[in-house]
Amino acid sequence: MLAFKEEHLPNYSYKDYKQWEGDWELIEGIPYSMAPAPSITHQELNLNIGIELKSKLKDCKFCKVLPEVDWKVNDETVVRPDTLVVCNLEEKGAFLNKTPLIIFEILSPSTKNKDRNFKSLLYSQENVKYYILVEPAGMFAEVYKLHKGKYRLEGEFKKETYTFSLDTCKFEFSFEMVFDL
């Protein structure tokens, strides 16, 4: 196997990213093609996550639930989580430039490695408080909470609830509602 030096790898910026056709993510200047159109199960799970979050956060004037929005971390990193929660969002534009507090990623065979490794490391470095990986094949979710700069597994959930504690609110999230397809 060849060993590449960093200077031999491609390095793109947000300016390049904006001009690409199709769906891409950009992580540390390296482009990643997003999976083909998500499966029906993926879409149903993402919708259920959004509905459950929206329902639980309806009285919180500070938090917003956003599905599939570009989060521009910096000029060389743009990701598009399946669903996220951001609080105290002051400006609205073409992309999110504020760190979310909660990110849900629904795993697929083609993105599982990136979601479990690259994105987990990126999100922890950017201080995303909660990272939830949803596994459609087994219909369960893994909830990770940031602790001293690293994610710690809080548990696997199928029908249980989990209490998210944000700066401005606290709420019970029902995974049973998410997996009710």
Image (tube, rainbow, N blue to C red):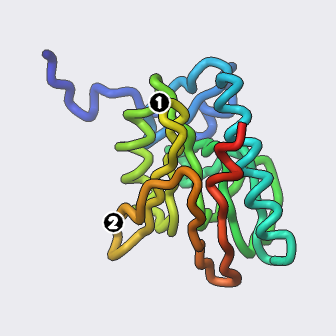
Above or below 89: residue 5: above
Give coordinates of residue 144: x percent, y percent: 43, 61
Amino acid type at circle 2 is: Lys
Tell me the element at label 2: strand
Report the number of discs.
Answer: 2
- Residue at (42% x, 53% y) in the render: 122
Query: Residue 74 at what x, y percent from top left?
Result: 54, 53
The secondary element bearing badge 1 is classed as loop
Q: Which residue is mark 2?
A: 150
Cα separation between marks 2 and 1: 21 Å
Residue displayed at 70% across by 55% down = 96
* Left or right side of 29 for 9: left
Q: Nearer the viewer, residue 53 or 116?
A: 53
Q: Mark 1: which amino acid?
A: Thr
Return the residue at label 1: 111
Residue 129: horizontal and vertical position, in percent? 51, 69
| Image-quadrant location for residue 116 | top left
Residue at image coords 75%, 53%? 66
